[in-house]
Amino acid sequence: MTKDEVLRIILETKVIAVIRMADTEKLVKVIEAVKKGGVRAIEITMTTPGALDVIKSLSARKEPGVVIGAGTVLEPETAESVIRAGAEFVVSPILNKKVIKLCNEYRTLVAPGAMTPTEILKAWLKGADIVKIFPATSLGPKYFKDIKGPLPQVRLMPTGGVDLNNAADFIRNGACCVGIGTALLDKEAIQAGDWAVLTEKAAELITSVQNV
């Protein structure tokens, strides 16, 4: 899948599910469940045990229309490793220009982290496809409206503190999509294998952000 196709899926669905799980089989079930609810972009963080193997496994057997990415990528060496493992997008909580450069060389979508207007513009000018605003919980939805005033061209994605109640507010205030983890991926439901709960939450989330 090309970078433009990956970006299109993310912008259409407006949601990236952020997953930290060691159990690959359960992870596959989680992906199937949230996909039924409309979520098609899955981020596997590098804090997940065996993250590279998980990304490689998921990329090899993912369903059409699903994109698998890597999160918590801090340096270019890791970015290259995850891309070679099959990651179709790379997300970072920090601004590392070398990570952006490498992803651009591989024509892989990259979303570096930033917080201040200076960091946000710097990330965009260096070639970010989306700028991850982290931690969004410290800033709130209105911050995105304030930033979009002087920087309307920058695609912004809040991560950290996004839940089913405020996701639409972030979109309404200028975010192009949201990154959401624990609020979407109910741990008790996963433990019990109650995948319908995850599908229901995913559908509720997708409906809320697409109705803005």
Image (cartoon, helix red, strand yellow):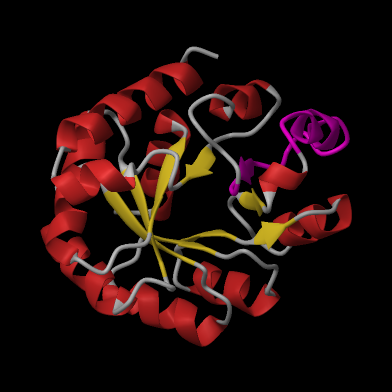
Q: Residue furthest top?
A: 211
The answer to whether residue 157 is above or below residue 97 is above
Q: Image check: 40 left or right of 181? A: left
Return the x and y of residue 152 as percentages of the image width and height: 77, 33
Q: In what quadrant of the picture does the N terminus appear?
A: bottom left
Q: In the image, which residues are magenta? A: 140-160
Query: Residue at the spot x=42%, y=30% of the render?
Result: 12
- Is 188 situated left or right of 98 in this image? left
| Residue 203 visible somewhere in the drawing | yes
For residue 24, side relative to residue 4 (left or right): left
Q: Point out the image quarter for the C terminus.
A: top right
Is 72 inside the magenta-drawn segment?
Answer: no
Q: Is residue 152 magenta?
A: yes
- Residue 28, placed above or below residue 82: above
Q: Residue at x 30, y 40 (%)?
A: 40
Of all residues shown, which one is farthest toward the bottom? 77
* In-front residue for pair 47/104: 47
Toward which corner of the image does residue 140 lie, by quadrant? top right
Q: Quadrant of residue 170?
A: top right
Can I make out residue 62 in this image? no
Give coordinates of residue 103: x percent, y percent: 51, 70
Q: Residue at x 57, y 65 (%)?
A: 92
